[in-house]
Image (cartoon, grey):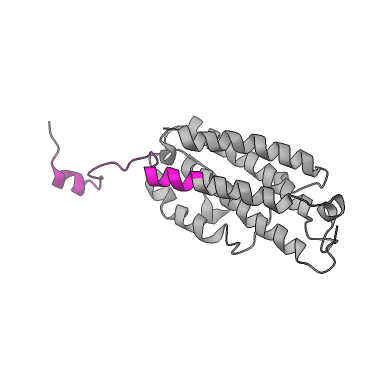
């Protein structure tokens, strides 16, 4: 039996389901975010000496090395969020639950608007060397960039929780762009450290 349009509207049901897969434009945007942030991060830590790596503007502020360590730890966690989302059942309410959050991520993350306290597992210890950070970053990014270019999964209909209420939950596509934009956010923090009076000359 066919259900008429009016019956669907009366029941509050959508006339057609939104596409949970990335559009070509969304994929291109994600790939560009990843490529741009990849180059930007490597440029931010390139040529940094051991003294510069460890120097802190103030006891409560992060050094260049700590910012970089946070970036690689956070990206590992975001990849886990993507995998966890895709391994979970489809969120039937995904459209409503994630509506507008892509725009919020793009608006606040890279420009470094607002402040947040990193969850405890992502707080840097200061123990990673520049070589450690670079090797881990390159390895993780290779996986994420390959995924962004090749996946055909319905990323938008799978969600995972975010610790900050304004972002909770995000779908797998949103987690995928959150990662490079989060990196760009902390690249700016690295630049701020370098611009602080007292930063070692070499």
**Height in image: 173 above or below 167?**
above
Number of numbered labels in the structure image:
0
Residue 26: % across, % down = 42, 46
Q: Which quadrant is home to the N terminus?
A: top left
Q: Is residue 199 magenta?
A: no
The residue range painted magenta reads 4-31
Q: Is residue 17 magenta?
A: yes
Displayed quadrant of residue 116: bottom right
Residue at (41% x, 52% y) in the render: 99
Query: x and y percent of residue 67 in the render?
Result: 73, 52
* Quadrant placement of the C terminus: bottom right
Percent across and percent down for residue 147 are 51, 34
Instruction: From the viewer's side, name the closer residue of 165 and 53.
Output: 53
Q: Is residue 127 visible?
A: yes
Please tell me which residue lies in front, 81 or 22. Answer: 22
Residue for point 51% across, 60% down: 107
Residue at image location 70% in from the left, 53% down from the top: 44
């Amino acid at each position: 039996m066919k259900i008429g349009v009016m019956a669907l509207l009366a029941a509050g049901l959508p006339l057609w389901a939104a596409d949970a897969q990335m559009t070509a434009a969304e994929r291109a945007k994600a790939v560009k975010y990843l490529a741009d942030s990849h180059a930007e991060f490597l440029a931010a830590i390139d040529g940094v000496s051991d003294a510069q790596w460890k120097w802190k503007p103030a006891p409560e502020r992060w050094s260049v090395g700590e910012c970089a360590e946070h970036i690689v730890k956070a990206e590992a966690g975001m990849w886990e969020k993507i995998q966890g989302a895709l391994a979970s059942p489809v969120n039937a309410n995904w459209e409503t639950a994630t509506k507008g959050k892509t725009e919020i991520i793009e608006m606040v993350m890279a420009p470094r608007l607002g402040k947040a306290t990193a969850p405890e597992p992502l707080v840097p210890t200061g123990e990673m060397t520049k070589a450690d950070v670079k090797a881990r970053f390159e390895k993780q990014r290779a996986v994420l960039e390959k995924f962004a270019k090749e996946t055909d999964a319905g990323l938008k209909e799978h969600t995972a929780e975010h610790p900050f209420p304004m972002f909770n939950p995000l779908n797998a596509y949103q987690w995928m762009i959150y990662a490079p934009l989060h990196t760009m956010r902390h690249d700016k923090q690295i630049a701020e450290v370098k611009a602080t009076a007292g930063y070692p000359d070499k």
